[in-house]
Image (cartoon, rainbow, N blue to C red):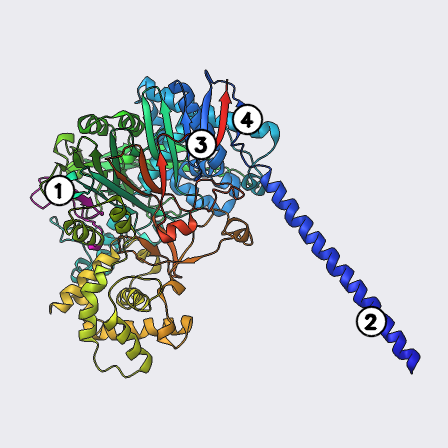
Amino acid sequence: MEVIIQTNTKRKRKWTKITAWIVAITIVLIAVIYFGANAYIARSLPKTEGEIQLSGLKEKVEIIRDKDGVPHIRAKNDHDLYMAQGYVQAQDRLFQMDLSRRQASGELSEVVGSAAIDKDKYFRALGLRRAAVASYDQYSNQAKDTLNWFAEGVNAFIKELDENGKWPIEFKLLGYKPKEWTPTDSLTIGKYMAFDLGGHWEDQAFRYYLLQNFSEEKAYDLFPSYPKDAPYIISKDTLNLEKSFASAVIPHEFNGSNNWVVSGEKTKSGKPILADDPHLSLSTPSIWYQMHLKGPDTNVSGVIFAGIPGIILGHNEEIAWGVTNTGPDVQDLYIEKRNPTNKNQFLYNEKWEDAEVIKEPIKVKDQKTIDYNVIVTRHGPIISEFAADSGKDTVLSLQWTALQPSNELEAILKMNRAKNWDEFETALENFQTPAQNFVFASNDGTIAYKANGKIPIRKKGDGLLPVPGWTDEYEWTGYIPFNELPKTVNPKEGFISTANNKVISDDYPYHISHNWAQPYRQMRIQEVLKANDQITAKDMRDLQMDKMNLQAKEFVPIFLNELKGIKDKTEKEAIQQLKEWNFVDNEELAAPLIFNRWMTKISDVLFNKEISVEMLEKFGGRKQAVDELLRHAAEGNPGPWIKENGGLQAVLKKSFELAINEIKDEQGNSVSKWSWGEYHQLYFPHPLSSVKPLNYLFNSDGRIPVGGSSVTVQAAANKNDGTVNHGGSWRFVIDTANMDSAYHLVGPGQSGHLKSKWYHNQLNAWANGTYHQTSLNTKKGHTLILNP
């Protein structure tokens, strides 16, 4: 017996030793793989210190990256300045730049495969790259030189990677190398930003769908305004809009922004203060790239889209400027009648006209090239059948200002060098698309605003619905004259603010838009600015992070007044949270979660049974429409959508129950433990993080609870799962009393390289509102010298 026990003990010890060795070897192997992988990825980190010889330069260029990763480029001539800008952008953002030009050009399938075919077809149909090619010839020789010098710098870095093989990990994972950069690539990215800021064709399509599928009373109940001209409906089954646009790429509904400028009469410094925070999709890396460019007659700091030369938003030594989206109706859908015997001919003024047929072959990774043709009528490309032949004798074409040649880069280069309002406004003549609300401040004390860009004048119609394309009745006859665009300089109020709100009163002689953002951000900004005559830059940063929800302040009392006889214990506690709420969308509170989820469920109750998911995605002004339906019902004038769902009280009761039950499933029965931040969480997704497990590689920081919402000044719009994916992509504040320095926030960071210390270093800063200062006189940091 003793022998057996000793034998078993020896066996156990032996297996314990073997297990220990296996565990140890496994740990060592994991460590080797981990550190090896990290070393492999890190080897492609760009050189930011020391010296590099760059063929093509004329003289030495100094690049100082400050503690926040912002490159300060100092060159002795313009050629070297913009060549260095291209080189530096490529160092930090080459994969993003390549993906951006591919998406806008409809060339994603070539590197990611068949999953991107529909997206490529859509962008080929739109023709952003064709518009960019047509735009190049409109540029001055100076602007063309700038584009070419920038491309030289990008290509110098691509050549460097090709020689040393240290490609960023994204190229390795997808198994391809980027082709040479061209001026057209930069212009195409510019056209994509015009696309991203929208133009409302999808709203026209949605209203057309409403009139096809619902009574006029129900359809018009969801219109932003009653149409002046009776809508032209061909027949209810002419176009299947759900099928036509099922794969269309629709820009984020809340692409907009805040900006404001305050005169020296209302500031502590006695000089104007300007603030700007463009609201776009949040991503890794950021849409924006912050830079400082100093050349012979240029000293400008701010941000630019990766892939484009110059600085689009920011300041120089005399002036500062920012933008928000004007949101004008610059797109029209035309109903085109097709010749039954020739699909490439369309009726116009009783004659069949030949459309232009453009061959757009689409290369697909590991598959055969797809032969794809785009048909362009006199109004623009046919977009109702890029994914399916959904119309037999009728299709929809798109006329859009951004598809015409334009020269925005010309404006950017002039803006960068402008010294006062007159020079800046002159530069704006070249900034045609997208139409933007520019605010301006100068250290000479001037503050100004202009709604700038090409906004069409229509012979008939006002951009509310698709219009007949077979007659000249609905043609564009020109654009609002530059000198008649909405403008104000040094207003008596002492400040100017915009938040995608209605630009000007109905007395204005031209049509601008039917689609304006909910007014709550603008109301809150004005509320704060009116109340203070000693405003500081810190006050403006605080205002950019303001979480006051004026929508809740308007509707919670109405809702609670309607919601009577609640017996459920959890629902009673939820109501008590709303009664005690100060209407601040604080991430630690339960009330913002209850209210914002309730608003979502009201929309669901009203529309989900009758409007398909595909078409609800095209309902651009849904939140504004719901607000109006609720206001009218509270005033005793419920429309058909409220009536048919049992009236306001029934809608509120049902949606409240749905909201509370959903929150209970997610956060438990204890209302006191519910929090907005448990659901509402910040995430900056990398393009490859949608492919698991690459999310752990590119987004290892995970998600961060944040406050705010889509209607607060601190914009933080979320997806249905609570992911905050939209907001202030760049935050900027400058007191013109000191033009040397400004406050910035570029979440999640400057670099697109996941091993860079500037990759996600501004992630928590974005959530907390921790800005960094950037100076025009930075002399310390990671210094890289580029030698000829």
Q: Earlier in the sequence, mark 2 or mark 3?
A: 2
Nearest to viewer (mark 1 / mark 4) = 1
* Location of mark 4 (residue): 159
* Location of mark 1 (residue): 494
Residues at marks 2 and 1, CA–CA distance in whole angstroms: 84 Å
Q: Choose between 332 and 549: the one closer to the eye.
A: 549
Q: Earlier in the sequence, mark 3 or mark 1?
A: 1
Q: Earlier in the sequence, mark 4 or mark 2?
A: 2
Magenta segment boundaries in residue numbering: 496-520
Nearest to viewer (mark 3 / mark 1) = 3
* Location of mark 2 (residue): 12
Residues at marks 2 and 3, CA–CA distance in whole angstroms: 62 Å
Secondary structure mainly formed by the magenta segment? loop
**Rendered location of residue 650, percent (x, y):** 22, 75
Name the residue type under label 2.
Lys
Disc 1 is placed on an element classified as loop
Name the residue type under label 1.
Gly
Q: Earlier in the sequence, mark 3 or mark 4?
A: 4
From this view, report whether residue 681 is shown above or below residue 566. above
Name the residue type under label 4.
Lys
Whether residue 519 is in magenta: the answer is yes
Residues at marks 4 and 2, CA–CA distance in whole angstroms: 60 Å
Nearest to viewer (mark 2 / mark 3) = 3
What's the residue at 44%, 32% (across, down)? 780
Which of the 4 image quadrants contains residue 573? bottom left
What's the residue at 33%, 61% (across, down)? 612
* Location of mark 3 (residue): 780
Label total for image: 4
Q: Earlier in the sequence, mark 2 or mark 1?
A: 2
